[in-house]
Amino acid sequence: MRLSPDLVRSLPAVALHDHLDGGLRPATVLQLCAELGIAPPPIPPARDADGGTDVPGGAEAPTAQDIAEWFHTAADSGSLPAYLSTFDRTVALMQTAPALQRIAREFVEDMVADGVVYAETRWAPHQHTAGGLTLDAAVQAVQDGLDEGVAAAEAAGSTIVVGQLLCYLRHLDPSDDLVDLAIARRDTGVLGIDLAGPEAGFPASRFAAQFSRAREAGIHVTIHAGEADGPASIADALDCGAERIGHGVRLVEDIDADPGATSSADDMAGETAGGTAGGAAGEIAGGATGDAADGAAGETAGGAAGETAGGPAGAPTSTQGSASTPTARFGPVAARVHREQICLEVCPSSNLQTGAAAELSLHAVGPLHELGFAVALSSDNRLMSRTSTSREMTLAAETFDWTLDDLEQVVLTGLDAGFAPAATRQTLRKDIVLPAFRATREQSAREQSARGQSAGEPDAREPGPRGQAAREPGARGHAARES
Ligand SMILES: [Zn+2]
């Protein structure tokens, strides 16, 4: 069995990190441009019949496909500021209540079509007042669209829970109006606040007073960090009260992936169980001492060290089918994120465009998941990155050889870290997510059996000892809650 795009799309997904102004449909961009009298993005000049020479005068009216390609190409810039410049195009179309409402409704429709059952859309209301909307009117317009989308989904038999996150922007001056609005609308769709925009040179601590006010009022906080700046920026975000980190992938700069002890599981068992590691063991990912000794240890893959150094006796290691298990030594920020199981809202395709990762096989999400960090997957900006949540899940599974169990863990991690009320998320877990993954596993097992383990069909993607190991005690309680 392969984790095909269609199969992954059929699974329930969670989208914690999806920008409203980064997810417009290309056709909607064109239609709003026409309605609002705004020129569409510059489309490369058409070519003549030979395909080689630009035709003077440029292309005819761009198609939705042209729009999709323009945004993707323009965003594929290698830097966060250049990537962000493409948002000028979408934000210009989002200055009226009808446009915001439409885009929010389409957000819900597109989430449902992608299999998402829990989604938080984030956007920066301060960017949407040029047409005369107040902050509150803009938030209401988005809420109207979300409500409309959810009602239509329910009428069609689909369940989805959505909410808004309101973003401050790092390069703008802090003001209390947005946090005040989040507090005022906490029961009418606003789930929390975020900090977005250019990271380097604009520390989160500039907004410390606003985040402090939010936290005192019980408003949830997530902050983009560790995308275009390093671990210190993540620490700064955590100090501001971030419960989750947007991206966070540069946390790997605070992890020594090869502390000189990378070895086979057996070797690791000898080192740790033999007590030779001493204090160093506490710094080894998944280890059961030191920073990782609070119950988060021994989970998923860091597992080899955790389990052998005092984890569940006789528990299977997570090294099934693998010659070696990565070990790592955490610096203080990585240790804190691991210990507190701070959810990292990871968006791999976006990171390739901003230069936060060179290629997918080198992306941090594989090692971070393997080392037992709380990782959730999202698309960030579906328009700019030509992606979706299920596509990010499919890519990660392909690239890092994840099983259904790995995907389930990522989805449940996202659901656990969601900002909607716990009872709402628990219902989704119990009624939709767990049954769907269970049914898919059973179905794939039946198919596997029917094929009689035909030659050339790898078992590696079936649930196996590796997946079970990830559900042993300490694995964030997913297995316990499933039963
Ligand atoms: Zn983002």
Image (tube, grey):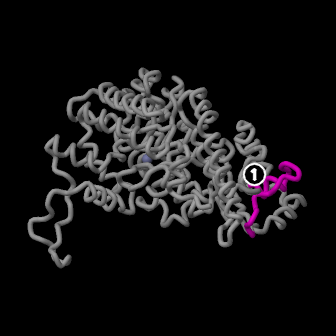
Q: Secondary structure of the magenta portion, mostly?
A: loop
> Dot 1: few (<14), some (14–19), or many (≥20) neighbours within 10 Å?
some
Identify the residue at image location x=31%, y=35%: 126
The image quarter in which residue 426 lies: top right
User: Could you say which is closer to the camera, residue 460 or residue 205?
Assistant: 460
Name the side, left or right, on which 98 lies relative to 464: left
Find residue 405 and report its horizontal and vertical position in percent: 66, 51
| 110 sits to left or right of 450 | left
Q: Residue at point 13% right, 65% down?
A: 58
Q: Residue at x 72, y 40 (%)?
A: 477
* Residue visible at 44% across and 28% down in the picture: 190
User: From the Cβ of disc 1, is ligand 1 less than 8 Å away?
Assistant: no
Between 32 and 345, the one nearer to me in the picture: 32
Q: Position of residue 254 (x, y in %)?
A: 61, 56
**Mark 1 — residue?**
468
**Amino acid type at image mark 1:** Gln
- The stretch of residues the image draws in magenta is 303-323
